[in-house]
Structure formats: C-alpha cells, structure tokens
Image (cartoon, rainbow, N blue to C red):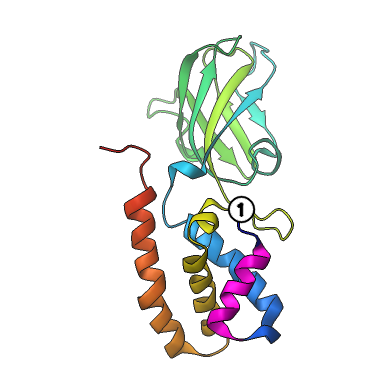
C-alpha cells in the first residue's frame, strides 16, 4: 500500500520544494482524485445493502445521509436493485430519474425509479421487501492516516508526477507545468484508460 508520505517523497523528487509541504500534500490528494475521475473504473465499484421498512402505504423510501454514511465516499450510483427478503436474488431494478422527471407525460408516477435530493437517496420500489442493493463508484481515501488508492499502489511515480504538475502550476512555473502535463499526465491518463477501463479481457 502506497502511503501519502511515500507519495510526498516521490513528488519532491520532481519539485525539489520541501518548503511547500502543505501544498504538496494537498495536491497529492487532488491528483489522486483526478486520476480516479479519469473515468469510471471497475476497481472503484462498490456494493452496499440498504435495509428499510416495508410500510405498504409509502409512495417512496428515503435514505438520508446516503453519500456520507450509507455509501462511503460515493461518487455516483451505477445501479439499484430490489432484493428478495432473504437477499438471494433481485426482483426489480430501479432507473435513475431527475426530480423533475418522476412523472410521465400523462401525470402518472413512473415505476421502478430513484432520484437524489441533496445527500438523500429516494427510491420508488414497486415490490418493497425491506432490502435493496446499491452499486456505486467510490472515491479513494485521501486522508493522511488512511490514504488508500489502487492507482497510487500501481502507479506511484506517475501519480507523483501528476502532483508535481499541480505544484508547478500553482507556484507560477507554468512552462514546467505544461511540460509535465504533456510528458507525464496525458500519457498516464491514456494508460489508465487503456489498462483499467474494463474488467473484461478478450
């Protein structure tokens, strides 16, 4: 596991600016997020089960604090499925809808849908069982103590160069930042897309 401290040392090899510790640590976090946000990588996919009451008169079920508690570090939801009461199999799949698109043109509430209200996940189950499964893309852990990123583990030098690019940009060395962008960051993005965008191998 590559630590934030190890990435800091690797970044200093490029920047040679030990006096910018706070900035360097900050941009390592930024570079880590940007690397994971190049696309939606299968290795960032997580699954969580949600329990809820099965009051039949409810038109929808709200899951407050979904992004901060129920789905740790969520970036975006890939899919939501209603599960059988025992959790053995799926019985329905919910479709994403904007809050302004919950009703059809004839004024009927759409079936099998979900939407977001701030940090609250709202689900409209047609067959409520009390158990749902959410597949979502999660951000990496960028805190100092618990830092964790599969990209950092696999490509520590490339990620350090990305962080150095941001340091150069923020300290006014724009030509160096542009050179690093062309020589390191752009090829690194291409590598991530070519190597990790799909979990399938032909």
Residue 89, image x, y percentages: 50, 12
Residue ID at (60%, 9%): 85
**CA neighbours of label 1 inside 10 A, class few (<14), some (14 to 19), many (20+):** few
Residue 124 visible somewhere in the drawing: yes
Residue 140, image x, y percentages: 59, 52
Q: Which residue is at the far left?
A: 202
Q: Which residue is the site of mark 1? A: 1
Residue 143 sits in which quadrant? bottom right
Q: Which residue is at the far right?
A: 145
11 part of magenta stretch: yes
Compared across the picture, whether 93 is left or right of 47 comes to left
Residue 75, image x, y percentages: 55, 47
Residue 59 visible somewhere in the drawing: no
Magenta-colored segment: predominant secondary structure:
helix
Which one is in front, 131 or 63? 131
Residue ID at (70%, 36%): 64
The tally of labels here is 1
Secondary structure, mark 1, is loop
- Residue 34's place in the image compared with 74, above or below, is below
Residue 25 sits in which quadrant? bottom right
> Which range of residues does the magenta coloring cover?
4-16
- Residue 54's place in the image compared with 80, above or below, is above
Compared across the picture, whether 5 is left or right of 153 comes to right
Image quarter in which the C terminus is found = top left
Residue 151, image x, y percentages: 50, 55
115 part of magenta stretch: no
Residue ID at (61%, 53%): 1
């Amino acid at each position: 596991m590559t630590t934030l401290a190890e990435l800091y040392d690797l970044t200093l090899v490029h920047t040679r600016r030990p006096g910018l510790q706070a900035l360097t640590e900050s941009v390592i976090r930024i570079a880590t997020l940007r690397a994971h946000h190049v696309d939606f990588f299968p290795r960032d996919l997580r699954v969580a089960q949600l329990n809820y009451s099965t009051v039949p008169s409810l038109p929808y079920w709200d899951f407050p604090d979904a992004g901060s508690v129920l789905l740790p570090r969520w970036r975006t939801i890939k899919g939501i499925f209603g599960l059988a009461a025992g959790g053995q199999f799926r019985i329905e799949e919910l479709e994403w809808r904007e809050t302004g698109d919950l009703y059809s043109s004839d004024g009927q509430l759409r079936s099998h849908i979900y939407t977001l209200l701030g940090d609250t996940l709202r689900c409209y189950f047609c067959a409520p069982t009390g158990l749902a499964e959410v597949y979502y893309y999660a951000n990496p852990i960028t805190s100092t103590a618990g830092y964790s990123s599969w990209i950092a583990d696999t490509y520590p030098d490339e990620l350090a160069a990305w962080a150095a690019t941001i340091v150069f940009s923020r300290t006014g060395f724009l030509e160096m930042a542009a050179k690093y962008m062309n020589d390191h960051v752009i090829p690194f993005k291409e590598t991530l897309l070519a190597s990790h965008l799909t979990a399938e191998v032909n």
